[in-house]
Image (cartoon, rainbow, N blue to C red):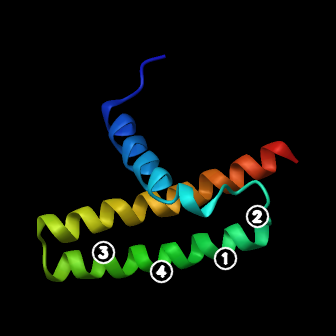
Amino acid sequence: MNIREEVKNFSNVMEEKLQKNDHKGGWGDCSLDYLTLRMREEQAELFESLRLYHMFPSEDTRRRVEEECADVANFCMMIADRVRLS
């Protein structure tokens, strides 16, 4: 299977964010309710970063949007992983 360059780039950002938070432990013991709540909190942060990007487009605000997207995606991945294992 060929993986699109965009998917590779985004998954690298996701992995960077996960590794940055390795000290917090994994998500194996987290409830679906908790993971869903955290995903929604990250979604709110994403919306805020998009608002800032629209108002002040720059490399910093672009990177913040990218990182917030990765945070949301990581919590979605955690939810999918927990459901897959149940």
Foreground: disc 3 or disc 2: 2
Q: Is residue 12 rendered to the left or right of residue 81?
A: left
- Packing grade of label 4 (10 A; few <14, some 14-19, many >=20) is some
Which sits earlier in the primary sequence, circle 3 or circle 4? 4
Which sits earlier in the primary sequence, circle 1 or circle 3? 1
Which sits earlier in the primary sequence, circle 4 or circle 1? 1
The residue that mark 1 highlights is: 37
Q: Distance between the residues labelled 1 and 3?
A: 20 Å
Tell me which corner region of the image, top left, top right, bottom left or bottom right, holds residue 51. bottom left
Q: Residue at x 17, y 68 (%)?
A: 60
The residue that mark 2 highlights is: 30
Tell me which corner region of the image, top left, top right, bottom left or bottom right, holds residue 63. bottom left
The residue that mark 3 highlights is: 50
The residue that mark 4 highlights is: 44
Q: Residue at x 38, y 42 (%)?
A: 12
User: Is 59 or 2 nearer to us in this picture?
Assistant: 59
Q: Residue 45 carries which label?
A: none
Q: How far apart are marks 1 and 2 (CA)?
A: 11 Å
